Each structure stands twice: as structure tokens, then as C-alpha cells.
Image (spheres, helix red, strand yellow):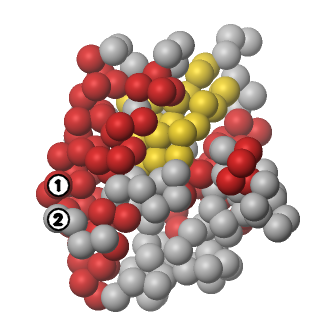
């Protein structure tokens, strides 16, 4: 069995907030850290070949995520790009976030990596404007030349538009452990397969 190194860049969703963070210094400030609060943990359990290298920071926009991209690429076979909600929350244009995501996808492709991009989750604490912006950003993500990981659909409540299903978020912003399990086991797939 050969190892597949998966480089992940993203925001708090890929960091595992609120119960986990890839940075030990940040994790030390979490009262009861739980490694199961990251979709990567569940994906690696489902496929033991996967070795995740994650650089994900709470609150970062796609331009900030892009600045950390190079830090995870050496030796990677696969790149997963995740982000966009913080751009919308901080009042930046949907198209700007999409361009930043496209740039990271393009960089991974130029390096010969298999590339996936996660679409944006439903946001329980958002309003109708945020829900519209998320829908538009997800449309633009769907047009990128990469495998789209259906994070939104995996957690979306089919009845309450723009919201996660009950039990899949503890704080209205991030997946619960169960939400991360669904993302890792159902939404994640290796690009090109």
C-alpha cells in the first residue's frame, strides 16, 4: 500500500474548529480538543493510504489562504483547496473569492497535482444575503477545472434552505464531529478517481 500525500489549505472548516486545530499552539487553547473534529481524520480512517498535510487558519480569506499554499505542496500528490466563507462574511466580492480559489487550483495543476476544491458549507448563522452569496460562489466553484467536493450538499438541510441539518453543527458556523465525519466519509474523494 503506497501513501498518498494530500495537501490541504483552508480556513477553520479544514482546521477542525471549534474542537481541533492543526497548529499545536492554537490547539493548546481548546478546552477539550477532539481530533475527530476534522474531516481529514475521517477520510484517513476510510482510506489508510491517505496522509494529510493541512495548513488551515480560522477566519482567513481566500487571499490569505493562497499565501500559505506553497507551505504544503512539497511531496504532495493531491491538493485540496477549501475556503470562501470568510471572504463573504468580511464583505468581499464573491468573484474575488472565486478568482483566488481558481488561482490555487491552477497552481496545483501546473505542479502536476490532482486537485480538488471544496464548495462552501451552508451557514446557519448567516442571513439571506449570505445564502445567496454562498450559492453564487458554489456555482463558480463548480466551474473550476478541479474535482468539486460536495461539502454543501453533504450537510445541507433539504427543508431549511441555507442551513445545516440538525446535529451537524454545534455552533452554527462549523461542522460538529458528526458533520466532519460525513464530510470525510461521504464528501471527500480523491480527484481523478
Number of other residues with Cα within 10 Å of mark 2, as a class: few under 14, some 14 to 19, many 20 or more? few
Counting from the top left corner in percent of width and height, residue 193 is at: 46, 27
Q: Could you say which quadrant of the image residue 4 lies in?
A: top right
Q: Is residue 101 visible?
A: yes
Locate the N terminus and report the quarter of the image it occupies. Answer: top right
Q: Determine whether, in the image, residue 91 is placed left or right of residue 85.
A: left
The residue sitting at 70% across, 23% down in the picture is: 49
The residue sitting at 54% across, 39% down in the picture is: 55
Q: Which of 57 and 38 is in front in this view?
A: 57
Counting from the top left corner in percent of width and height, residue 132 is at: 24, 77
Q: Could you say which quadrant of the image residue 182 lies in?
A: bottom right
Identify the element where label 1 is drawn.
helix
Q: Determine whether, in the image, residue 87 is placed left or right of residue 16.
A: left
Number of other residues with Cα within 10 Å of mark 1, as a class: few under 14, some 14 to 19, many 20 or more? some
The residue sitting at 24% across, 84% down in the picture is: 129
Q: Can residue 192 be seen in this view?
A: no
Picture disc at residue 118 = none
Counting from the top left corner in percent of width and height, residue 176 is at: 67, 69
Q: Determine whether, in the image, residue 110 is placed left or right of residue 86.
A: left
Circles 2, 1 touching at the beta carbon (< 8 Å): yes
Residue occupied by mark 1? 96
The residue sitting at 71% across, 48% down in the picture is: 25
Residue occupied by mark 2? 93
Marks 2 and 1 sit apart, C-alpha to C-alpha, by 5 Å
Q: Is residue 29 above or below residue 57?
A: below
Q: Which of 178 and 101 is in front in this view?
A: 101
Amino acid at each position: 500500500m503506497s501513501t498518498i500525500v494530500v495537501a490541504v489549505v483552508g480556513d477553520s472548516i479544514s482546521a477542525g474548529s471549534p474542537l481541533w486545530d492543526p497548529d499545536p499552539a492554537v490547539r493548546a487553547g481548546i478546552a477539550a480538543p477532539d481530533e475527530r473534529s476534522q474531516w481529514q481524520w475521517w477520510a484517513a480512517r476510510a482510506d489508510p493510504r491517505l496522509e494529510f498535510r493541512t495548513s488551515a487558519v480560522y477566519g482567513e480569506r481566500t487571499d490569505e489562504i493562497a499565501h500559505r499554499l506553497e507551505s504544503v505542496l512539497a511531496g504532495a500528490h493531491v491538493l485540496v483547496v477549501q475556503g470562501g466563507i470568510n471572504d463573504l462574511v468580511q464583505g468581499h466580492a464573491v468573484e474575488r473569492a472565486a478568482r483566488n480559489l481558481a488561482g490555487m487550483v491552477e497552481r496545483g495543476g501546473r505542479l502536476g497535482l490532482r486537485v480538488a476544491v471544496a464548495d462552501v458549507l451552508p451557514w446557519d448563522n448567516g442571513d439571506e444575503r449570505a445564502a445567496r452569496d454562498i450559492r453564487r460562489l458554489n456555482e463558480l466553484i463548480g466551474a473550476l477545472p478541479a474535482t468539486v467536493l460536495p461539502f454543501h450538499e453533504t450537510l445541507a438541510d433539504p427543508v431549511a434552505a441555507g442551513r445545516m441539518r440538525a446535529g451537524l453543527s454545534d455552533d452554527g458556523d462549523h461542522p460538529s464531529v458528526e458533520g466532519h465525519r460525513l464530510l470525510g466519509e461521504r464528501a471527500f474523494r480523491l480527484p481523478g478517481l
